[in-house]
Image (cartoon, rainbow, N blue to C red):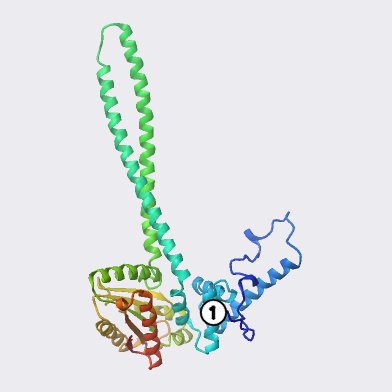
Amino acid sequence: MPILTSSPWRLRRPEDGACAQRVSTGGADAPDAATPAPQGPEYSRAREARRELLERITDFVLEHDFAVTSGNLGAICSALSGANAQLAEAFAAREISGEPIDQRWLDQLVRLDPATNERMSELERLMDQMEYSLIRFAQTTRSAHAETSDHRGAIDAEIAAMAEPREGASALAEVGRVIGLSRAMLEHVGQIENAMERSRAETEALRENLAMARMEADIDHLTRLPNRRAFERRLTSDNARARAKGEALCVAFCDVDHFKLVNDRHGHDAGDRILCMIGAMLNTVGSDDCFVARHGGEEFVLLFYGLDKNAAALRLDGVRAAIAAKQLMNRETGKPFGKVTFSGGVADVTEEADPRSALARADAALYEAKQAGRNRIVTR
């Protein structure tokens, strides 16, 4: 792996200090007052390595004007520390080539990173297991509740029969004793039923909360469109369905042109409103055969089911033209935004066995559209 000694953010090997190490700043991670702080040259070197890593991450974020998000910081930290060798090599190669290191490039790098995709798949698997366990528990509770109700009915009938008057005081006393025991058992059964009913209600509520949490985890909170996580799952399912049925499937990446200028001139709140407007316009083509999501930053992604790349590009170009024709005004300041446009790249998902190759081709087409002057759609 190349080591860039000339760069202020020289890449480091994992042993130089990994992202996972904690930096103690007080609070829960601070040493206990009664516990002596670690001392010695080895601790000092590790502490200095962490400080250097944080400084290089900060310099890198500011130099390339990255937003301070958990996704960006995680990827940058993994690369600069050397914790992820593939990301580190990609960062080094990008700097050597002199190509721009920007949000679009970082988003592409992260979405094609096998470790990221593996973590997302593992999260999906664990959530599915949890939901399945809750469903099974709810079914078991309902079954036990039904059996208990049947048993209670049988005991009620038996008690009613035993309560009929009989000859002889001793017999009546015996019956009274049995009835008393049965009533005590019934009371206990009733308590069990109540507890099971509460457990069933709590389980149902937990399952509903889990479903709501999963839905919220799939939504971009700014535009209210599906997010990258939802897109990844939809890509997998649509790709499998398209291949099984021999139908077309295309993916498109869209990136707002000169979006940094919008933020610089009008502020981030205005930039957010622009993103919401573009997301809403893109969503007008959304339907059962078109899935629209915000992929991150100023980038959106669309899946066109049943359309070849030319038909998909034509539909997307209609939205591009409609947005480019708008005269947008910043309602907070009364100043015009000027012409707001986006560029797009479209690729056929089913051309190759790995759908991720289509993502790379669509991203390359998007880059080609940017290089050709922006405000256009290119197919690959």
Locate the C terminus by quadrant.
bottom left
Q: Is residue 156 above or below residue 312?
A: above
**Please, is residue 373 above or below residue 156 in the view?**
below
**On-image quarter of the N terminus:** bottom right
Q: Which residue is at a point 69% across and 69% down the rendered structure image?
A: 47
Note whether 175 is above or below 145 in the view shown. above
Judge whether 331 appears above or below 78 on screen: below
Please tell me which residue is depicted at 43% across the width and 65% down the height of the picture. Answer: 120
Query: On the rendered structure, is 291 left or right of 334?
Result: left
Residue at 26 percent of width and 71 percent of height: 242
Q: Position of residue 21 (x, y in %)?
A: 62, 66
Q: Secondary structure at mark 1?
A: helix
The amino acid sitting under disc 1 is: Glu
Q: What residue is disc 1 on? A: 89
Pointer 1: residues within 10 angstroms few (<14), some, or many (20+)?
some
- Percent x, y for residue 359? 37, 78
Residue closest to the eye, 165 or 207: 207
Which residue in the rendered view is the most extreme toward the bottom? 373
Q: How many marks?
A: 1
| Nearer to us in this view, 272 or 56 | 56
Q: Is residue 338 at least partly visible in the picture?
A: no
Q: Is residue 366 left or right of residue 46?
A: left
In the image, is 87 to the left or to the right of 3? Answer: left
Q: Position of residue 272 (x, y in %)?
A: 42, 78
